[in-house]
Image (cartoon, helix red, strand yellow):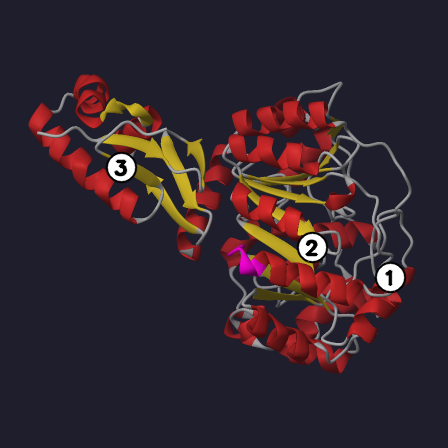
Amino acid sequence: MNALIDKVMSRARLLGVPFSVHLDLTYRCNERCRHCYLEHGAGSEMPAAQIKNLLDELAEAGVFFLTLSGGEPFLRADLFEILEHARKLTFCVRLKTNASLIGAAEADRIASLGINEVHVSVYSGSPVVHDRLTLLPGSWQRTIDAVRLMRSRGQNVILVHIVTSLNAGDHHAVQALAGTLGTGFRIDATIIPKLDGDRSTAALNVPHAELVEIVGNPAYAGRVEEVCAPDSAALSEPLCAAAHNHCYIAPDGGVFPCVQLPLLCGRIGPERFLDIWRESAPMKEVRAMRLGDLPVCSLCSHAASCWRCPGLALLEGDLRGPSALDCERSYARTGVAPTGWLRTG
Amino acid sequence: MSEKYIARSTGVAARMLDGEMIVMNVADSSLYTLNEQATAIWQAADGVTPLREIVGRVICREFEVDPETAYRDAERMVADLAAHGVLLVSEAPIG
């Protein structure tokens, strides 16, 4: 089935269709996760009527996968109004939440709406460790209770485990918990800098030994044998889905190539989504970039298989440069020093 | 001969891509791509128009297929999509 999704996504890319959109409904959050890349100030948010108009535009533009996230989306009193409209437009809706505000009534409504997946952040098998990361006492218990409520109604749930230096080694327990709860499990070992440029969260990245265990595990990381298999065809391939068949929309209507690529392309309201998607200069710039255009990474033996994120590279200083975080991950997978380290030391 | 009525399941995600409908059963994430004829039937599946009428109006007219062959093919396609939970089939109007 993944092969069919890949084929459809590839067709969407060739046709210039934004098949996948990540829409943050708010940056407000009831947790204060120490590794979070967002600032949780009030900020402006599109009202429900504007979001519903936007969803109409996205459906017309051909968007299929719609990820709704935040901040914590359940802090919006109009969340279900938005979800209902999204499902009426037959989007494949994925909802990202810490789940701590989901009770029985919310679980009933989620299950009745046909949400494809609910992604729930769980940082540890231990309530103490999880709550130490979220800075919200009792959050682990509320989150797990909500997962149980959703699973008892047959809702697909994925536990998403972000690995940091504060919960290193806990992924085995969270994976076991996912098995007990009957949920899926995903792991992410990259702590990205804050979108405002603050890089203090980088100190929370996991120690090298654990990174090796995680990214070197095919069950987590995919096919390790593909690493260090340079492919000249890759040099003319797009860097990632950003601006090709995917983009990000912020709570205030700002449109970006990806949630991790803070290049403002336009704003919903004054401009229509499709005009931004097709015509904005930053969107076109990212869309035009190829691996062969990157002065350091194009020469690297990891080039064809590296998970290099253009957004991380930009947050580290250069959209076309290497990302030290991704060089570290690629080194952890392969044990071979990447070319990017020649610059970063 | 009893009529068949078809309606799109509420538990699906769907979007047109380059003339073909992409359909996902959101409960199990199974994904289907419908060819042009299946897409035309999918779009006409309003729950109240008999399948035979849909085939005559949409398939035979647009694709120049003989009615009996087109109906047999449509029945097979409808049964297949119903088995995967993305289409509802009934002998009475739906909804």
The x and y percentages for residue A308 are 67, 58
Callouts 2 and 1 in the same chain? yes
- Quadrant placement of the N terminus of chain A: bottom left
Q: Nearer the viewer, mark 2 or mark 1?
A: 1
Q: Chain for mark 1?
A: A
Q: Amino acid at mark 3?
A: Val
Residue B38 shown left or right of residue A343 in the figure: left
Residue A264 shown left or right of residue B1 in the figure: right
> Quick check: is A273 in the magenta stretch?
no
Magenta segment main secondary structure:
loop
Q: Which residue is mark 1?
A: A136
Q: What's the mark number on residue B89?
A: 3
Graded by Cα atoms within 10 Å as few (under 14), some (14 to 19) or many (20 or more), the crowding at tag 3 reads many
Q: Which residue is mark 2?
A: A309
- The residue depicted at 19 percent of the width and 17 percent of the height is B61
Residue interval drawn in magenta: A151-155
- The residue depicted at 27 percent of the width and 33 percent of the height is B38
Q: Amino acid at mark 1?
A: Leu
Q: Secondary structure at mark 3?
A: strand
